[in-house]
Image: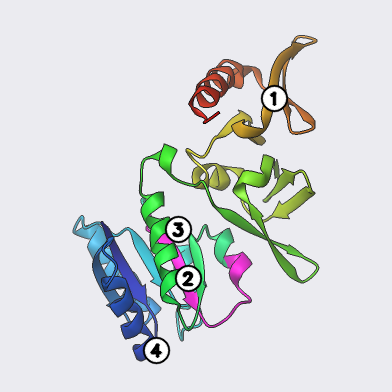
Amino acid sequence: MLRVLAVDDEVPALEELAYLLRQDSRVEQVLTAADGVTALQDMVQMIGAGERLDAVFLDIRMPGLDGLDLARLIGGFPSPPRLVFVTAHDDCAVQAFELEAVDYLLKPVRVDRLAEAVRRLDAASAPPDECGQDDVIPVELGGVTRFVPQQAVWFAEAKGDYVRLHTVDGGYLVRMSLAALERRWAGAGFIRVHRSTLVSARHVSELRFEGGKVMLTVGTETLPVSRRHARQVREQLVNQHRSMPS
């Protein structure tokens, strides 16, 4: 059961969102705040009191502390709640997902889309091997936002402050750290094989020794496995392929 906080400076929209959330049997409690500063204060008090908060449904365009700035502050909490953005604006999706948002809903909120967001939150709160199976990453390509499914990604490669997602269709650069992506896709079959590389077990076809090095074939690419990761990678691949449906 989820305990959530809804934040919106438009009172009718806040009341409607809270009402819809309370109708969902997976939601235990819905708290509300009419601005970002109040929401931040409420969350700090909850943390101080040891209370659990699983998710924040957050508007973006608010006076004072807007949703994106509030999300960045939330990200600095020791155990931050997950984020779902609820907004009338469709131009902040990439920024939202860079902040590791679980979902991005457009107003007026449809009941089925809200239910899907709650389902994703519920799945994200499940044990690691039950979550992260249908995630997508938004990528900006010449003014067009393309959504890359997690299951299409062969491997992810760190590139400074960015990560390049490699798929059968090519590579996509996303402003996100590899560590953040690893946390986001924890339990979804992704394995760290090098300090700069995260691979999808479902796309690995071969692990071999070559010239004193451990090499991995994923998709049509051959990647090195660092020595410190080699034994763990082999064990994880064997275990994950055993558990995958035939």
Callout 1, which amino acid? Answer: Ser
Q: Is residue 200 visible?
A: no
Q: CA distance from mark 4 to mark 1?
A: 52 Å
Q: Label 4 neighbourhood size at 10 Å, few (<14), some (14-19), many (20+)?
A: few
- What is the span of residues highlighted in magenta in the rendered image? 80-95
Q: Earlier in the sequence, mark 2 or mark 1?
A: 2
- Between the C-alphas of marks 2 and 4, the distance is 14 Å
Q: Considering the image in quadrants, where does the N terminus appear?
A: bottom left
Q: Residue at x 50, y 44 (%)?
A: 183
Q: Give the labeled residue for mark 2.
A: 85
Sequence-wise, the earlier of marks 3 and 4 is 4
Residue corresponding to mark 4? 10
Which residue lies under the disc numbered 1? Answer: 205
Instruction: Give the numbered dot on residue 75.
Output: 3
Counting residues from the start of the chain, the first of labels 4 and 1 encountered is 4
**Label 4 secondary element:** loop
Q: Nearer the viewer, mark 2 or mark 1?
A: 1
The Cα atoms of the two marked residues, 3 and 1, are separated by 36 Å
